[in-house]
Image (cartoon, helix red, strand yellow):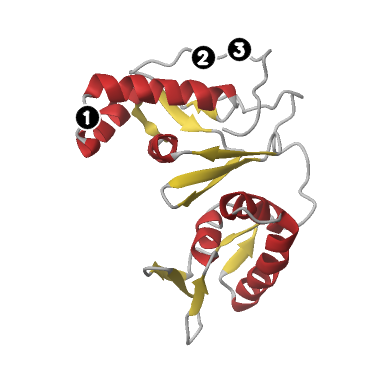
């Protein structure tokens, strides 16, 4: 995990019967079995190793911690007790970074300053995939067919990761920040590459503003 946690923030004690979900202010992208998270509330990037990325992917707001540990233990062929202990340790680490909320809590996730991600207006449009855009993943690319288009658009290179991020509303700088962390590149360079791709997807009707 990349950013120091708030030492003054009260941490929760997670248990096997708890239901946990990701903070709504966090965007994620999976890269080669690991994950990069962008916490918009704190403007921080976090890198998750493979075990933490696996737990993160399972936090759907419905399954209990125990059920998640059971699923992972069955998949990996390891003892439930060992996996549960590891899962709880990962949740503690994620919670230290303010990346989690209890699934049954109606309270908004807040940063240390007491503001939510929705308190501040975005400086530029947020884009996400249009629900009527058809797509499929190939070995190393994503093919996108916008509604009404005759030919699909091929997104190669960082394109699959970009398309994955666009499942949730993101600005171009946010997309560039996450991708630059995952691919060890300068954010400005990534943004210069990403912006024309996003512009073209918008022109073709594959993305919509939120």
Q: Which residue appears at 65% of the width and 31% of the height?
A: 3
* SS category of the residue bearing label 1: loop
Q: Which residue appears at 40% of the width and 21% of the height?
A: 88
Q: Distance between the residues labelled 3 and 1?
A: 32 Å
Q: How crowded is mark 2: few (under 14 residues within 10 Å), some or many (20 or more)?
A: few
Q: Which of marks 1 and 2 is nearer the N terminus?
A: 2
**Is residue 20 positioned above or below 25 on the image?**
above
**Is residue 208 positioned above or below 79 on the image?**
below
Q: Which mark is residue 39?
A: none
Judging depth in this view, the residue of 126 and 33 nearest the camera is 33
**Is residue 144 positioned above or below 59 on the image?**
below
Quadrant position of the C terminus in the picture: bottom right
Q: Is residue 139 left or right of residue 142?
A: left
- Residue carrying label 2: 12
- Residue carrying label 1: 78
Which label sits in the foreground, 3 or 1? 1
Q: Is residue 149 left or right of residue 39?
A: left
Indicate the position of residue 56 as horizontal and vertical percent values: 44, 37
Quadrant position of the N terminus in the picture: top right
Question: Is residue 109 shown to the viewer in this render?
Answer: yes
Judging depth in this view, the residue of 102 and 190 nearest the camera is 190
Q: Earlier in the sequence, mark 3 or mark 1?
A: 3
Q: Is residue 68 left or right of residue 108?
A: left
**Is residue 191 positioned above or below 133 on the image?**
above
Question: Is residue 146 shown to the viewer in this render?
Answer: no
Badge 3 vs badge 1, beta-carbon distance below 8 Å: no
Q: Residue 10 carries which label?
A: 3
Badge 3 vs badge 2, beta-carbon distance below 8 Å: yes
Which label sits in the foreground, 1 or 2? 1
Judging depth in this view, the residue of 11 and 115 nearest the camera is 11
């Amino acid at each position: 995990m990349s950013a120091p946690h708030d030492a003054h923030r009260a941490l929760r004690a997670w248990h096997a019967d708890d239901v946990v979900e990701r903070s709504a202010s966090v965007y994620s992208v999976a890269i080669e079995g690991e994950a990069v998270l962008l916490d918009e509330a704190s403007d921080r990037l976090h890198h998750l190793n493979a075990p933490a990325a696996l737990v993160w992917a399972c936090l759907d707001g419905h399954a209990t911690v125990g059920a998640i540990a059971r699923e992972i233990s069955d998949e990996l062929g390891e003892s439930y007790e060992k996996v549960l202990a590891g899962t709880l340790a990962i949740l503690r680490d994620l919670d230290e970074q303010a990346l989690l909320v209890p699934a049954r809590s109606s309270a908004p996730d807040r940063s240390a300053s007491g503001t939510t991600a929705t308190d501040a207006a975005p400086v530029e449009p947020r884009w996400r995939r249009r629900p009527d855009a058809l797509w499929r993943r190939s070995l190393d690319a994503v093919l996108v067919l916008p509604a009404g288009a005759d030919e699909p658009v091929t997104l190669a290179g960082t394109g699959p990761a970009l398309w994955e991020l666009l499942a949730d509303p993101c600005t171009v700088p946010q997309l560039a920040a996450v991708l630059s962390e995952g691919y060890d590149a300068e954010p400005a360079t990534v943004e210069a590459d990403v912006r024309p791709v996003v512009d073209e997807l918008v022109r073709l009707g594959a993305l919509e503003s939120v």
